[in-house]
Amino acid sequence: MPDRRLVAGLDLGSTKTCAVIAEVAGDLPRSPLAKILGVGLAKNSGVRRGMVRDIDETTRSVAAALKDAERMAGARVTDVTCGIAGEHVSARGSTGVVAVSGEEISPQDVARVNEVARAVSLGRDHELLHDIPQEYVVDQQHGISDPVGMTGTRLEVEMYLVTAQATAGQNLRKSVQRAGYRVADLVLEPLAASYAVLTDDEKELGVALVEVGGSSTGVAIFHEGKIRHLASLKYAGSHVTSDLVQGLGVTQSDAERLKERHGSAYSPLVSADEVVSLPSTAGQGARTAPRELVAHIIHQRVDEIFQLVGREFERAGYGAGRLPAGVVLSGGTAHLPGMVELAREVFAVPVRAGHPELGISGLVDSVQAPRYAVPVGLVLYAARKIAHGGGSAPSVLFGARPEKLFAPLKRWLQDFF
């Protein structure tokens, strides 16, 4: 079906791989929609803290998740937009300055100033993921989002550069290629999730997206419509599971099941007389534990994770009262009961769980969980890129002359941020 423009998002987590296939619909190019056609989930133990540790296991997981999504969608895809995260990702600001060549600022001038800001040494082992223009400055006038056509002699840009370890990107691509697909784009996960769960008003006022995954917790802070801070913390859902293994004397897989079925991240939500039966070996005999104990173990660890996130807010200058729109939780661990209540207590700001609902249609109910924020955000990213003439393949981009290339690219980057 060549007339259907299909996009696929792939989120490689440390416990699960999520794939989402969507069709680009809606009013193009102004407001593209992603019509969700298929969703696939597969277990994955080949990724740790955003790095591929086992290529064979990751390849198997990618193939299984995408095959499920394709079966549900009744269509095949060749290219996927892949999420990337972890402590190896870093971000920093960069400025560029050029003299304006003519009477007024042309798209070529903007392309030149962007190029200057981008031309920083990334180090041997880093690749550039995103270069996001934060604002342009024309002759000391700040806060300009599109300077083309303005009169001035000096043009500056404040750019936010996001880089990732090159080998991490290569191993991700290799795993996807071995499963028989091609990586069209690598996109930072908290950034992807923000397209699916954050409203423009929230990004304008000041909001933090906290993505609690299996082996790392991602933090992205948005303010005045722009991304202001990124961080990745190495404590997340798998630490909660390990605590249950230690505290209750159960196996890793049993601890995971207990967490899913009886877990709560906020002890006050659990009544004192509830009892859960524990899986046990023949030697241990039948065992039970108060559900309060299970909740207490989870509560302690999640509280610690949130305290670290709070410290990250302080470090970024968004401490007490600086996030009027509060915190939005996403990621697989965010669906645990009590997460929102505990986060409200720790951060003392409004908190909600991020269910993907912005810009999507089709099988919306299949992705109504915080764990789908990233894959849904990835298909929205891909859909907007196609809508703005970016095409699905990077080769389409780099065949054009610079001004032809940067104008649509800049436009759709600005639409995001």
Image (tube, rainbow, N blue to C red):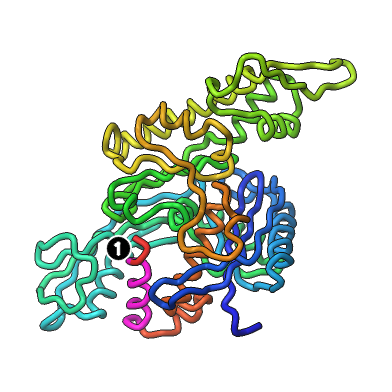
When the figure is inspected, residue 364 is found, relative to residue 351, above or below; the finding is below
Q: Secondary structure at mark 1?
A: strand
Q: Is residue 126 visible?
A: no
Instruction: Give the position of the N terminus as an image quadrant.
Output: bottom right
When the figure is inspected, residue 156 is found, relative to residue 332, above or below; the finding is below
How many badges with numbers are in the image?
1
Q: Is residue 159 visible?
A: yes
Q: Residue at the spot x=71%, y=65% of the render?
A: 72
Image quadrant assignment for residue 254: top right
Instruction: Give the position of the C terminus as an image quadrant.
Output: bottom left
Q: Is residue 69 left or right of residue 321?
A: right
Task: Tell me residue 32's x, y (percent).
Answer: 45, 71
The magenta-colored residue range is 402-414
Asked whether 404 falls inside the magenta stretch, the response is yes
In the foreground, 322 or 399? 322
Q: Amino acid at mark 1?
A: Pro
Task: Tell me residue 146's x, y (percent).
Answer: 23, 70
When the figure is inspected, residue 109 is found, relative to residue 284, above or below; the finding is below
Image quadrant assignment for residue 413: bottom left
Q: Report the magenta stretch's main SS.
A: helix
Mark 1 sits on what residue? 133
When the figure is inspected, residue 157 is found, relative to residue 348, above or below; the finding is below
Asked whether 225 falls inside the magenta stretch, the response is no
Q: Residue at the spot x=28%, y=57% of the render?
A: 94
In the foreground, 186 or 388? 388
Q: Is residue 5 left or right of residue 58?
A: left
Q: Residue at the spot x=35%, y=83% of the render?
A: 404
Task: Tell me residue 410's x, y (percent).
Answer: 33, 71
